[in-house]
Amino acid sequence: MNSWWNRQRSLADYTLSALARRKGKNVALIVVYALVVFLLASVMFFSTAMRNEAALVLKDAPELTVQRLILGRQDLIGAETVDTIAAIRGVRGAHGRLWGYYYDRVSGANYTVMVPNDPELVPPPRHVILGEGIPRARGFTFEGAALFLSRFVGDLQRFDVARTFGTDSALMTADLMLMNEADFRDFFGIEEGLYTDVVATIRNPNEVAKIVEKAGRDLPEMRFVSRDDILRTYQKLFDWREGLLAALTGISILAFAIFAAEKASGLSAEEAREIGILKAIGWDTRDVISMKLWEGLLVSVGAFLFGTTAAYTHVFIFGGKLFAPVLQGWAVIYPEFRLTPHIDALQLVSLALLTVVPYVAATLVPIWRAASADPDAIMR
């Protein structure tokens, strides 16, 4: 065992010296290789972190949301539906929600306007609580500022900013505006007894499907959306956007595939001459193949480490600036937040299978041909 280890260590030392002799070529190779790893790893890390954040956000979402559909579109729902849902066996409680969207012509952004259920988050009359993205879009950053909102030409209403949410909750609150119920109904013209939708809490989450079946018989015009349905929708959305980014990085992947194919087609004249000299001075075929495999491993692992480290820094320290607009999905207001690192062994193994294994495998065929040939024929 010791002799095998010493042999491999000697081969690795020689390989490092050989790589140093062709420093410029190998540095360029590692940079290009690391760039491919960086692009793939950034997409993988960012999308996985976003899925994890979405799962954490939806963990406290209501188990069941009830919406009224008219002509295939969501419409306001009456207060009597709240009582009907609450009376179903297995439902712990139900309440109506008031929320909607407001298009701000000043910033060109859509805001999510909502009446909070938490009394501590209900602002005073003619006041609002804003997510951190709205002050950025409007150009003010201090609490107590006046916010003027216009529903139509000639209409202008003033609200004072009670406070703003911090960046730690920006993923959920970046474009959020909270109002009290009276201001919301007055601003949007919603009559008493009408709500946007109804949310219900379920005693046993395993009974959601059965409760939906019961409620569907009493309220056939309603649409029932469970928390699992919302989570699956988010996961599919992130899968689609991740696939879009993977397609956009296809050019670099194609270049890498062409490079690997060129590597497999044969060795350069300088590399073939080096192998011929090594064979002439007593190296056997096994030693030559081991040396070249060490070279492929050192280049691949070096590029893999550089690429994954750069991707980690890009995604979890700098917020994935290259891919955030595509994966986050906000049109105008982009939340400023730091993703929580979430990397597992399966991600790294998958990344290695896509990048390291093809390059190392591409070196085997030409090396075996050169190493098994006659040294004199190789050098000629």
Image (spheres, grey):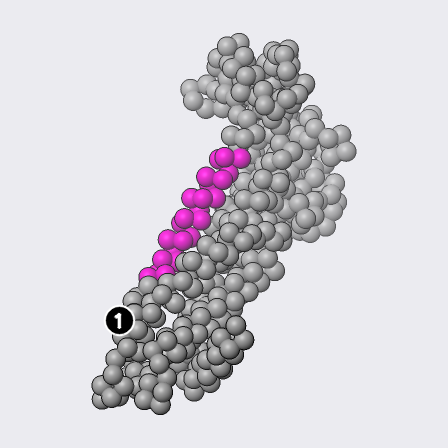
The residue stretch that appears in magenta:
231-255
Q: Residue at x 43, y 87 (%)?
A: 21
Q: In the figure, 228 relative to 24: above or below?
A: above
**Left or right relative to 251: residue 314:** right
- Say if the magenta span includes residue 326: no
Locate residue 299, reporting x and y percent. 44, 73
**Position above or below: 19 against 233:** below
State the residue in front, 223 or 364.
364
* Residue bearing mark 1: 265
What amino acid type should be assigned to the residue bearing mark 1? Answer: Ser
Please tell me which residue is depicted at 44% across the width and 49% down the height of the picture: 242
Direction from residue 215 to residue 121 in the image, left or right: right
Give above or below for 80 relative to 348.
above
Residue at point 39%, 67% (across, down):
360
The quadrant of the picture occupied by the C terminus is: bottom left
Q: Nearer the viewer, residue 340 or 275?
A: 275
- Residue 254 in the magenta stretch? The answer is yes
Between 112 and 62, the one lying in front of the other is 62
Residue 307 drawn at (x, y percent): 49, 65
Asked if residue 89 is positioned above or below residue 205 in the image, the reply reads above
Q: Main secondary structure of the magenta part?
A: helix
Q: With 42 as the anchor, is 114 left or right in this view? A: right
Task: Look at the image and tell me whether residue 332 can be seen.
Answer: no
> What residue do we see at 44% from left, 46% from top?
241
Query: Disc 1 on helix, strand or loop?
Result: helix
Does residue 327 appear anywhere in the picture? yes
Graded by Cα atoms within 10 Å as few (under 14), some (14 to 19) or many (20 or more), the crowding at tag 1 reads few
Q: Is residue 187 left or right of residue 145?
A: left
Count of numbered labels shown in the rendering: 1
Q: Position of residue 243 (x, y in %)?
A: 41, 48
